[in-house]
Image (spheres, rainbow, N blue to C red):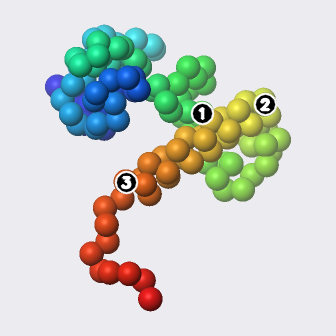
Amino acid sequence: MDDLSHFCCLNSDCPDHGKRGAGNLTVTGRYGPGKARRMLRCRTCKSRFSERKGTPLFDARLAPEKIESVLEHVAEGCGVRQTGRLCRVAPNTVARYSRLAGRHAHDAHDELVGLSPPDGRGPVR
């Protein structure tokens, strides 16, 4: 059985939009190299989308390990050209994945901070 508790419907018109673990998602098929990626379907609104939709890996041509390596080098402070040389990818590829990952991290931060549970310790003094 597939664990879909980390996913939510991405259709903004769906009543279950953004509700993780709501039980409204099913796996309708698999695709990609080795059929490793899942195609998800929302039972509520009937929309279909990839499990990678909304992530820096969506529609990626590089192997996930290569993308991870690129982003690790960037996170360590390597420049675009240096990262491209070390990972054997074009500098534009490094810039594109950095931009995608940065946008994703920004959105994830806003979601986590905006929805974080209240702290029971009281106000900071």
Q: Cα distance, mark 3 to mark 2? A: 35 Å
Residue 115 disc label:
3
87 or 45, which lies in front?
Answer: 45
Tag 1: Cα neighbours inside 10 Å, few (<14), some, or many (≥20)? few
Name the amino acid, label 3: Leu
First of labels 3, 1 by sequence position: 1
Q: Cα distance, mark 2 to mark 1? A: 15 Å
| Relative vertical location of residue 120 with respect to residue 115 in this rendering, above or below | below
The residue sitting at 60% across, 41% down in the picture is 103
Look at mark 1 in the image and give the residue it sits on: 66
Give the structural element (helix, strand or loop) at label 3.
loop
Tag 2: Cα neighbours inside 10 Å, few (<14), some, or many (≥20)? few
Give the total of numbered labels. Answer: 3
Camera-side mark, 3 or 2: 3
Residue 92 disc label:
2
The residue sitting at 29% across, 36% down in the picture is 19
Quadrant assignment for the N terminus: top left
